[in-house]
C-alpha cells in the first residue's frame, strides 16, 4: 500500500557533517534518510584518495555513522539513499556489506554507476573544451570527471526492493526526487511534480543549512550546538511541510527556507537539472506553526538534452580553512558557536 505522506530526513549535508544527525532523526517518524556528501571539490579529494588506495574513494563517514544505527534502521524499515559512493561506489557497498554481515542484517544494497567519465577525457580534450572561468585549455591530467546523473536510477533501485541506494555523482536533489518518483509513481514527463520533488531535495541537501545553520539573521537562531536536521513531509501533489526533530535547536522559518531555496541555483526560473528544468520563482511559503513551513508552487519544464559534467584537476594550489564564518557581523556570529572551543579574534 502506497503512503499518502512520505517523510524524508536530511541526515547529512556534506562530507564531515555531524555524526549526531542520524540518532536525532531516528527519534522521529521518518521513512527515508537522504544523505548528501559530494561537493565538487570533494570529488578531487576522493579521487586522490583512490589513487593511493584502490579501496578508498568514498566518504568513510557514511559507513561509520550508519553502523551504530543500522539495526534500528533495519528494524524500523527505514531506507537510505545517498551519494556516498563518491568515485568508488562499489567499494562503499562492499564496506557496508561487511558491516551488515557483522550485525547479521540482511539488507539489500543497490549501487548506481555510470557517472565516471574519466575514460572519455581524451575525447573531451579533442573537442577543445575550455575551463568555464579561466578559458584555459582542457588539462592533460584529470583527477575526476563525473556526470550529474538524475533520479530515475534511484527510483528503479527502490522499485526493485533496495533498502540502501548508493550513488556516485548525481544531482544532490535527485536523491529525494528518486524517492518521491518511486513512492508516488510520478511520470518522467510530469514536470511540475518533478520540479517539486527536486525542490524537496534541494532544501534537504545541505542538512541544517535549511534549519538556520547559515541564516543571515543568525541571532534569531537558538541552540546552534544542538541544531535540528530537516525533515520534509511530502505529499503526492509535490508540496511538503519542512520541520525538524522535537527538542532540537535551529529555526525553520520563511526566511531560513527562502535562503536555502535560492542557494546555488543561479536562475530561479530555470534551474537546470538532469530530470527537469525547475522554476522556483512562484514557490509559496506558509508558516504553519513554529518551526513548520509549508512549501508549494514549484513548476517545471522538460530537461535539456545533456548532462552537467564536473571535472577536477590539480593546479598546484591548496587552501585550507579550519573554521569559516561568513556574513554580516561575522565575529559576533562566531562567538556563540566557538566560545567553548577556542578564543575568537575579531
Image (cartoon, grey):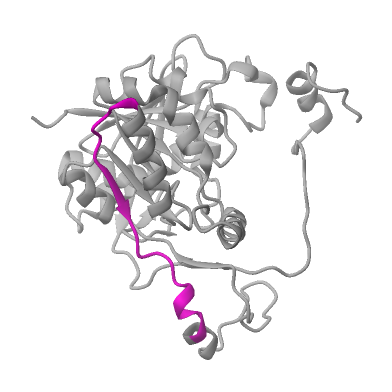
- Residue nearest the viewer, comparing 36 with 185: 36
Q: Where is residue 211 drawn, in percent x and y?
A: 53, 27
Does residue 237 appear in the picture of this structure? yes
Give yes or no for residue 121 being in the magenta stretch: yes
Residue furthest right in the image: 345
The residue at the point 47 percent across, 65 percent down is: 146
- In the image: residue 5, left or right of residue 216: left
Which residue in the rendered view is the most extreme toward the front? Answer: 102
Compared to residue 225, the image places residue 272 above or below, namely below
Q: Nearer the viewer, residue 31 or 77?
A: 77
Q: Is residue 82 left or right of residue 125?
A: left
The magenta stretch spans residue 11: no
Q: Which of 313 and 241 lies nearest the eye of the viewer?
A: 313
Residue 324 image offset from top left, x and y in percent:
75, 39
Q: Quadrant of the C terminus?
A: top right
The part of the image, by quadrant, that contains residue 19 is top right
Q: Is residue 253 above or below residue 61?
A: above
| Region of the chain picked out in magenta, as a range | 103-122
Q: Is residue 271 above or below residue 7?
A: below
* Residue at x-position 60% and y-position 56%: 49
Residue 169 percent location from the top left of the image: 44, 57
Q: How many marks?
A: 0
State whether residue 281 appears in this view.
Answer: no
Left/right of residue 316 with respect to residue 199 in the rendered view: right
Closest to the observer, 320 or 88: 88
**Left or right: residue 115 compared with residue 107:** right
**Which quadrant of the figure contains the N terminus?**
top left
Q: Residue at x 68, y 81 (%)?
A: 136
Amino acid at each position: 500500500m502506497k503512503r499518502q505522506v512520505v517523510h524524508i530526513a536530511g541526515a547529512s549535508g556534506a562530507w564531515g557533517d555531524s555524526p549526531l544527525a542520524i540518532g536525532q532523526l531516528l527519534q522521529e517518524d521518518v521513512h527515508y534518510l537522504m544523505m548528501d556528501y559530494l561537493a565538487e571539490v570533494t570529488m578531487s579529494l576522493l579521487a586522490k584518495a583512490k589513487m593511493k588506495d584502490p579501496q578508498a574513494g568514498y566518504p568513510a563517514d557514511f559507513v561509520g555513522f550508519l553502523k551504530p544505527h543500522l539495526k534500528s534502521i533495519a528494524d524500523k524499515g527505514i531506507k537510505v539513499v545517498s551519494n556516498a559512493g563518491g568515485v568508488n561506489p562499489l567499494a562503499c557497498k562492499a564496506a557496508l556489506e561487511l558491516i551488515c554481515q557483522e550485525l547479521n542484517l540482511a539488507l539489500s544494497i543497490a549501487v548506481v554507476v555510470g557517472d565516471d567519465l574519466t575514460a572519455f577525457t581524451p575525447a573531451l580534450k579533442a573537442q577543445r573544451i575550455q575551463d568555464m572561468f579561466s578559458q584555459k585549455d582542457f588539462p592533460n591530467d584529470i583527477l575526476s570527471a563525473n556526470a550529474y546523473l538524475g533520479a530515475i536510477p534511484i527510483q528503479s533501485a527502490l522499485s526493485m526492493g533496495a533498502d540502501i541506494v548508493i550513488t556516485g555523482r548525481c544531482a544532490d536533489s535527485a536523491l529525494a526526487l528518486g524517492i518521491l518518483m518511486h513512492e508516488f509513481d510520478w511520470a518522467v514527463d510530469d514536470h511540475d511534480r518533478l520540479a517539486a520533488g527536486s525542490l524537496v531535495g534541494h532544501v534537504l541537501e545541505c542538512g541544517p543549512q535549511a534549519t538556520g545553520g547559515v541564516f543571515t539573521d543568525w541571532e534569531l537562531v537558538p541552540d546552534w550546538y544542538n541544531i535540528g536536521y530537516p525533515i520534509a513531509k511530502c505529499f503526492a501533489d509535490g508540496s511538503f511541510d519542512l520541520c525538524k526533530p522535537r527538542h532540537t535547536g535551529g529555526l525553520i522559518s520563511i526566511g531560513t527556507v527562502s535562503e536555502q531555496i535560492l542557494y546555488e541555483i543561479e536562475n530561479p526560473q530555470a534551474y537546470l537539472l538532469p530530470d527537469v528544468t525547475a522554476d522556483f520563482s512562484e514557490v509559496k511559503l506558509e508558516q504553519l506553526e513554529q518551526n513548520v513551513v509549508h512549501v508549494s508552487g514549484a513548476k517545471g519544464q522538460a530537461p535539456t538534452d545533456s548532462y552537467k559534467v564536473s571535472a577536477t584537476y590539480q593546479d598546484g594550489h591548496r587552501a585550507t580553512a579550519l573554521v569559516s564564518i561568513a556574513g554580516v557581523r561575522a565575529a559576533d556570529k562566531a562567538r556563540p558557536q566557538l566560545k567553548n572551543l577556542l578564543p575568537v579574534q575579531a
